[in-house]
Image (tube, rainbow, N blue to C red):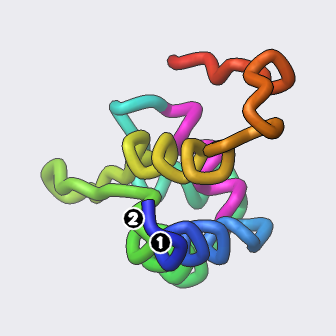
Amino acid sequence: MKIEAAVEALAALAQESRLSVFRLLVQAGSEGMAAGMLGERLAIPPATLSFHLKTLSHAKLVKSRSEGRFVIYSANYAEMDGLIAYLTEHCCAGDATQCSPIKKC
């Protein structure tokens, strides 16, 4: 991951509602969640949620797909893993015993 992409992803997550949306999508798994359900679960009005989802999508942290009348959003795990790898690259001055392992879902 390049530094520009890392900065964009971190900036997208540096807001309470967007971080909550992203965490809920991570928990939802690859099945994802409809935008309406996201809004209900987090008590975010539709227009505000749309703004936050656009920011997360632009940072490539979430993906969307259409299913009938619904737009389903899901976390982009590859991008999330790339950001985590970027942040932990060369961790702990090369002493891998200091870094806790990342558990895969």
Rendering quarter of residue 12: bottom right
Q: In the image, is 27 to the left or to the right of 88?
A: left
Location of the N terminus (image quadrant): bottom left
Residues at discs 2 and 1 in contact (Cβ within 8 Å): yes
Instruction: Compare residues 58 and 85 and report the one nearer the observer.
Output: 85
Q: Nearer the viewer, residue 93 or 11?
A: 93
How many marks are shown on the rendered structure? 2
Towards the viewer: 102 or 71: 102
Q: In percent of the image, x 41 and y 57: which residue is there?
A: 62
Residue for point 52% across, 82% down: 51
Residue kind at label 1, given as amino acid type: Ala
The label nearer to you, 2 versus 1, is 1
Residue 46 in view in this figure: no
Q: Main secondary structure of the magenta part?
A: helix
Q: CA distance from mark 2 to mark 1?
A: 9 Å
The residue identified by callout 2 is 60
Task: From the top left corner, tell me how far across and down residue 38 is, in percent.
Answer: 55, 53
- Considering the numbered disc 2 on the image, is that residue within a helix, a strand or a loop? loop
Magenta-span inclusion, residue 3: no
Q: Disc 2 residue type? A: Lys
Furthest-left residue in view?
68
Say which quarter of the image contains residue 17: bottom right
Q: Is residue 81 above or below residue 21?
A: above
Farthest residue toward the front? 94
Residue 104 horizontal/vertical position (percent): 53, 18
Highlighted range, magenta: 18-28
At a point 54% along the width and 52% down the height, the residue shown is: 83
Indicate yes or no whether the magenta region holds residue 20.
yes
Which mark is drawn over residue 5?
Answer: 1
For mark 2, does the 10 Å Cα neighbourhood hold few (<14), some (14 to 19), or many (20 or more) residues? some
Secondary structure beneath label 1: helix
Q: Please tell me whether residue 74 is drawn above or below residue 44 in the rendered image.
A: above
